[in-house]
Amino acid sequence: MKYKNIIIENALVILFGILIFYLDTLEFNCAYNKGLILFFSLFKTAFFLTTGFKKIMQFTKLDLGYHQFLVFISIYTLMIIFSFMVDFLCLYQIDRVSFTGIPYKAGFWERVFNFFYYSFLMFSNIGMATIIPETIVAKSITMFEVILSFVTIILFLSDFIGLKKSLTNYFKKNKK
């Protein structure tokens, strides 16, 4: 399986978020920036969910090992965490009241680290963050990441062997 393709597919999704961030730094006056980020996050959540299911189907058809699946899940997880970090950072750049717990005078790289930390905690379901989403858009994007986390950890990772057996039986029945 080509992990390079997985990274490229997901990197394109992340680049769109960076483009929104860049447009904001140019003071691109668009009243719909927060809505654009929210829509993009929802689209991205659906993209990651469908990509995850498609890759599991591919793993099942190719009868690849569990260790190869773990490499995919590791890349997939890091892409999700990084992607939502970009969303949170973009949203904070547009509207600083979206999150509390970020020092107001924090430099750019400190904000990047803080949102990576927040995204990592949300994905790992620890939820003990000093950063708190305050607006509906910030809370919605956080919920999107938690949904992806739940699906990835509970459905994909914890029961891959059972899911693989079930899909293998399904494919065998449909070949007949």
Image (spheres, rainbow, N blue to C red):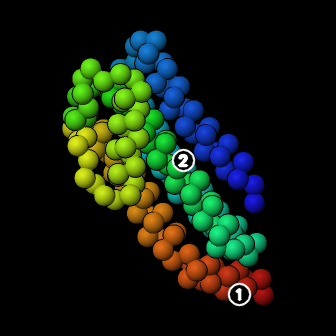
Q: Disc 1 residue type?
A: Lys
Task: Specify the label residue 118 is tagged with.
Answer: none
* Residue 173, horizontal then vertical, whole percent: 71, 87
Q: Is residue 40 left or right of residue 103?
A: right
Compare residues 31 and 4 and report the one nearer the observer: 4
Q: Is residue 144 left or right of residue 61?
A: left
Q: Is residue 117 above or below residue 169?
A: above
Q: Is residue 127 above or below residue 60?
A: above
Q: Please tell me whether mark 1 sits on a helix, a strand or a loop.
A: helix
Q: Are marks 1 and 2 in contact (CB under 8 Å)?
A: no
Decide: few, some or many residues near mark 1? Use Cα within 10 Å; few <14, some 14-19, many ≥20.
few
Could you say which quadrant of the image residue 170 lies in?
A: bottom right
Could you say which quadrant of the image residue 32 lies in?
A: top left
Q: Number of callouts in the render?
A: 2
The residue where tag 2 is placed is 79
Q: Is residue 98 left or right of residue 21?
A: left
Sequence-wise, which precedes: disc 1 or disc 2? 2
Please tell me which residue is depicted at 50% across the width and 32% down the height of the picture: 17
Compare residues 107 and 86 and report the one nearer the observer: 107
* Residue 164, horizontal then vertical, whole percent: 62, 78
Q: Is residue 25 above or below residue 89?
A: above
Q: Is residue 12 left or right of residue 3?
A: left
Does residue 139 appear anywhere in the picture? yes
Task: Specify the label residue 173 is tagged with.
Answer: 1
Q: Please tell me whether mark 2 sits on a helix, a strand or a loop.
A: helix
Please tell me which residue is depicted at 44% across the width and 15% down the height of the picture: 25
